[in-house]
Image: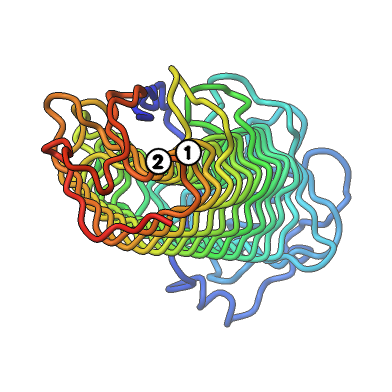
Amino acid sequence: MHRRRDILSGIVSTGIVVATGLAGAARGWSAGGGIPASELGLRPGEGGDQSAAFERAAREASRRGRPLQLAPGTYVLGDVTLDDPVAIIGQRGVTLRCAAGARRMLHLRGREVELRNLVLKGSMQAPGRQENYNGLVTLRDVEQVYIRGCQIDGAGGHGFALEGCGGVIEKCRIRKVADAAVFSIAGSGLKVRGNNIADCGNGGVLIWQWDQQHDGAVVSGNRIRRIRADAGGTGQNGNGVNVFRAGGVQVVGNDIADCAFSAVRNNSGRHVSIVRNKCLRLGEVAIFVEFSFYDALVERNIIDDAATGISVTNLREGGHKARVVGNIVRNIREEFGAEGEQPCAIAAEGDVLIQNNLMENSAYFGLLLGWGPYLRNVRAVRNTIRGTRVGAAVSVVEGAGVAELVSNTFEDVNIAVAGYDYTRRVTGELVGARNVPGNIRLRGNVVR
């Protein structure tokens, strides 16, 4: 079930925007007061590309250890590159506009970076295939970034793109970007919180690593809407939050709706927690934990209107060990997925505890336990499943491991529990039956 996905390929080196908390120099800069940009020869609306004047002013402010304070107005910038620690502070009425033909607006590589209260305007026109992993603002190897209260309105690549960074991106508004609002790769403890993200071509927030290793990002309290999958693919695009190979990531308390694929997708991330998210109107699996993941937690999420609710699969690729607890999954549509896969509220394969979940109005299956021989130690306990054709479909093919169903309640179902050979039902009702396949353990289940 749901294993037919192309692992993300063709990853190209990208720029990155990072932030860990306003620590170090960023706090010191803010406390010390900014230098008016006009004192350093930079004034808004002075015609043409102001990149050179901006670079000079920012470097001088950095040399003095103080923020660059911009006056209200519009500044036209393109391919500005700064290697020094820098703080750029705006206010109401400050707009940075990307110069025509520029690959990006800002490329920042200083040890510490602060951006605050800026409106950044780019173009939705993509800058060319070789630039697809750039951001309107690109940061590399920045130990501490603090980005707060900024607005991105239009970008031909990503909005904020970060590589090798840590820090905070918070209370920003990011919309109409061609790729993802926030793209972080090889990061360390990046916090993306309280942002408003909408109308993105391929992703909302992407947390990636080059190799499978710890990342520690926290993606929390964001409102994410209308994420498309313009670049196509079978799931690497079109997600509200996408975790790829990054371990120790927390995706908590986000409000995500209207994504072409998933609200949250964890591909091969270990020790990833997906908790208390609201996930509405998804084109495919609302919460997807797939490929070589390990030790996943999917807890207290609300899912309403998706092609499948929660999928924790790919035992064949080593994906195993998860807890799926206390979720509400409703209104799973009668749509068939790739290669005849059938929709369900919760699917699981390897070493998974499914407990205290409410599944309601799933068009085909409530629980789908195993896929062919890929079933091992799945335990479903005290779940409520109502309004579906088959409450729990359990794989009984040769080689399938044990599934245990204990104290579950089935209401308004055609069949409570049945054995399956992939998509073909091969048994009748098993609750109360004398002959139950040897790999299925049933105890205390109630059918109403």
Closer-to-camera residue (360/301)? 360
Please, is residue 25 above or below residue 429 in the view? below
| Residue at image coords 27%, 24% | 421
Q: Quadrant of the image for the C terminus?
A: bottom left
Q: Is residue 89 visible?
A: yes
Asked whether, in this view, residue 289 is left or right of residue 177, the answer is: left
In this rendering, is residue 281 above or below 399? Answer: below
Sequence-wise first label, 2 or 1 = 1
Q: Check disc 2 and give the amino acid type.
A: Ile
**Is 371 positioned to the left or the right of 145 in the image?**
left
> Which residue sits at x=48%, y=64%?
276
The N terminus: image quadrant = top left
Residue 131 in picture, x, y percent from top left: 56, 26
Q: Marks 2/1: CA distance?
A: 6 Å
Q: In the structure shown, which secondary structural element does the residue marked by tag 1 occupy?
A: strand
Q: Position of residue 417 (x, y in %)?
A: 32, 42
Residue position marked by numbered label 1 in the rendering? 389
Q: Position of residue 67 (x, y in %)?
A: 61, 69
Quarter of the figure with residue 307: top right
SS category of the residue bearing label 2: strand
Marks 2 and 1 close (CB-CB < 8 Å): yes
Q: Nearer the viewer, residue 293 or 21?
A: 293
Residue 257 shown left or right of residue 264 in the figure? right
Disc 1 residue type (three-letter)? Arg
Q: Residue at x 66, y 73 (%)?
A: 34
For label 1, the crowd category at 10 Å Cα-Cα, with few meaning under 14, some 14 to 19 and many 20 or more, is: some
Task: Identify which residue is drawn at 72% across, 59% down.
Answer: 118
Question: Which residue in the protein does label 2 denote?
Answer: 415
Residue 81 appears in the rendering: no
